[in-house]
Image (cartoon, helix red, strand yellow):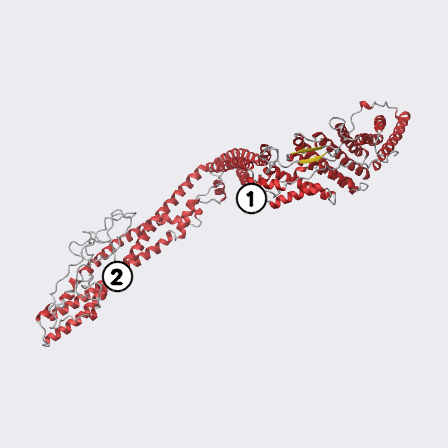
Amino acid sequence: MAGSASSSSTTNIMLAILEKKTTSVDLFRPLRNFIAFNYSEREAQNLDDDLQTLKQLRSDLERQSDPTPTARRDLLQNYFKTLCLVETRFPISPDKDHINTVTFTWHDAFKHKQKASQQNIHLEKAAVLFNLGAVYSQIGLSYDRATVEGRRLASHAFIGAAGAFAFLRDNAATKASIGSSTTVDISVECAGMLERLMLAQAQECVFENTIAKGSTPGVCAKISRQVGVYYEEALAALNVAPLNQHFDKAWISHVQLKAALFYAEACYRYGLELHEKEEIAEEIARLRSGVSALTEVKKSSKGAAAQLLDAISKLEANLNRNLERAMKENDRVYLMRVPSPSSLPPLPAFSMVKPMAMNEVLDASKEKMFASLVPDSSAKALSRYTEMVDDIIRTQAEKLQQASELTRVRLKEMDLPESILALEGNFTLPTGLKEDVEAVQISGGPAGLEAELQQLMDLRRVNQEMLIQIEELLQKEAREDAQFRSQFGTRWTRPQSTTLTKNLQDRLNRFAANLKQAADSDGRIERSVREHSAFMSILDRRPIESALPTLARPIMSLDANEDAIVGALKQSLRQLETLGAQRAGLEDMLKEMKRKDDILPKLMTSTGSYEDLFRKEISKYDHICEEIAQNMEAQEQLLLQIQAQNDDFSAIFNLEDYKASREKCYKQIQAAIAKYREIKENINEGLKFYVTLQDAITNVKQQCSDFVMTRNIQCREMMEDVQRQMAGLNFQDGKNTGGYNSNYPSAGHQTQRSNPQQQVDPRSQTPYYQPREQPPMAGYTHPPPPYSSSQPPSPYHVPATSASPYPPHQAQQQPPASHEYGQPAYPGWRGPYYNAHAQQPGSVPRPPYTIPAPYPPHQSGYYKQQ
């Protein structure tokens, strides 16, 4: 098609911005002095490296001799982030309490003779942002835009330049213009104009690539029209104060020509599309509009680049050629009325570019320089923000917990999911009751009580047999003593056995009485086991749930919809469980966000209001709070649905009768556990009693054995003595009469010599007869027995409140050590046989061999006096 050739190949004329120039300034010394004065010299030394880095960055900025534009760009970005760190920690101003020895001076980029000097960091930041945009534009101009890739990279660079100028306009220009000394190039108006200009050049690169790719005329027209719009916006800013007197005419002419050129280009491309649609009348009007724009702009083209003027001429020729063709076709074929250009709607436009978001590029919150310096204002702001976040998390966590607790209570009221599990045979006991049953089964259960009863009987039999053996041992010794006494008559002067064994006999009688009482208790325990065996057998069921009643389906059903009701209820319960899992996940998300929420670096780099930063950061929690609210609302609706479904379920399956029978079974299990524990406790008490009693009987048995052995030794010695008397040996009467009497302490007594530090074995003592040379010994007298008529009661007596079914255990009383009983009869009598507490008067039981002792009145617990 005629005129399809693009004029873009000849419009490759674009603008780059030159950097602002500055003068040298020393930041190291003033900032270091501030740290040393307000913090400490040690802190200043620790930050020397950071200060040196800042100094080097400023020095590199002043030099303006970076090897490549990209290196210059990185330098400017790093320096700007460092300035953000400096701003929140070092107050630079004319104030006497601030850093008032630093003055920043910058020249205007477009009128170099104009300059601004300020004692604040805002001018420095604004100038750096301006230079960053300028460097981005230089990078865009440096690419080879004759290639598709070169044009793509150039477009991206111009987008970066637009982002830098937009950031300057929105964040730094106003603050930098407040000072008494400022320049136009960093004003809000200039920054906005430069942003539009860079977007126009970025969109122009996209248009050139669109043409190169052979896109449709309609697409090319929209993109071209947006190029013209951006140029028109830049031109509008250049034509008003303060920019209309600040830029060279060539600048304004260039922008004006570009705006008209791309408007005409859009008309040209749109006309091609209209021609294909055979909309000849509008095509003619659009082409005339394009030609008119070019004709008008050429009147003010003084100072414009020749290449740009040539592009305008070529485009004008194409427009006229297509216009002539369209008019001929309309006159000959279509005969349409051509509308006036003013009556046409605006050409459609479509933007393919937008300013680069510099917030992330220039974010200084992750920088580590001067991190140890935290001003008091930042610390207070951090504390306040932390309280705000904690309050949000605490409130939301309480809502989640309340929702979970509400679910638990409502389900428990409806007996869910227990009733569903009971229908499926998967029911279980309440946790506490199940643990009690498991403890009973682990300890042997009711079935194991028989073995423990047998162990009781075995221990009782062993104790009884030991008592019989001791009794037979003492009786045998007594018979032998009586036989010798009858044989030798008055010559047998040794004390009678019954006199010496009275204490041992008393203890044996008490042991026998205790065994009699224990046997009665054993019998009651055995009867209780037999009587309640069937009652407690429920505890031996494995698993215990097999003893519970089952929830059965109705025998008859009118509509046979039981399965549908159960299925719907189970589905609702699953949905409720899903909501609960979501709540747990939301709570974890809140905690994780709180853990990662480190706002301090942002506070240290923020130059605006803390409130604005707080609102922005707090808004991160909004979506979780909304999800929690939605979760709780969904749960409430679901619980109402479950309530209705459960009412139907209860009516069909007669759930109330099942609950009653189940509770009855629970109570039966609890009663069986209580009875088992009672019997088990009584058995354990019996085992403990028999083991302790066996130790005491064993001790007495050893005493009796020692006593009998000693009496046998004395018996042999006395027989030898009597035989010597009968053989006519010369003995003094006085020395013979009491020799043996003084050496027979009663059995069970502790004997000591007058010197308690020296005890001698009886086998090495002086013979029971005394030589004539020795002084006569005192006659035989019995020492006071330790168990006299006012003898204390058995130590097994306990108060009537005792719960044990068994008599208390036997113990041996310690005899007083102040008596002197003569020489010990045998070594085993030198100490107490069985230590215990003192006995109480009046509790000596009767010997079991005459009248059986009654069951002691202090028995309590399950077993009562019959």
Q: Return the residue nearer the eye: 845 or 209.
A: 209
Tag 2 secondary structure: helix
Quarter of the image that includes the N terminus = top right
- Residue 256, above or below 492: above
Q: Looking at the image, do the residues carrying marks 2 and 1 touch, with CB atoms under 8 Å apart?
A: no
Q: Position of residue 74 (x, y in %)?
A: 69, 43
Percent position of residue 259, x then y? 80, 30
Q: Is residue 282 above or below residue 125?
A: above
Between residues 318 and 500, which one lies in front from this camera angle?
Answer: 318
| Left or right of 619, for residue 219 | right
Q: In front here: 758 or 535?
A: 758
Q: On screen, 23 above or below 301? A: below
In terms of image quadrants, where is residue 687? Answer: bottom left
Q: Residue furthest left?
A: 733
Decide which of tag 2 and tag 1 comes sooner along the chain. Answer: 1
Is residue 380 toward the left or the right of residue 293 in the image?
Answer: left
Residue 148 seen by the camera: yes
The residue singled out by tag 1 in the image is 41
Task: Please give left or right for residue 648 compared with residue 162 in the image.
Answer: left
**Mark 2 residue crowding within 10 angstroms, few (<14) / some (14–19) / many (20+):** some
> Residue 753: percent from the left, percent from the top?
19, 64
Kindly indicate the quadrant of the structure image that contains residue 575.
Answer: top right
Q: Nearer the viewer, residue 469 or 81?
A: 81
Q: Please state which amino acid type lies under the numbered disc 1.
A: Glu
Q: How many dots with numbers?
A: 2
Question: Which-is-in-front pick, marks 2 and 1?
Answer: 1
Q: Amino acid at mark 2?
A: Asn
Image spot of residue 148 (x, y percent): 79, 41
Q: CA distance from mark 2 to mark 1?
A: 85 Å
- Residue matched to label 2: 699
Tell me if residue 558 can be seen: no
| Mark 1 burial class by Cα count in 10 Å: few <14, some 14-19, many 20+ | some
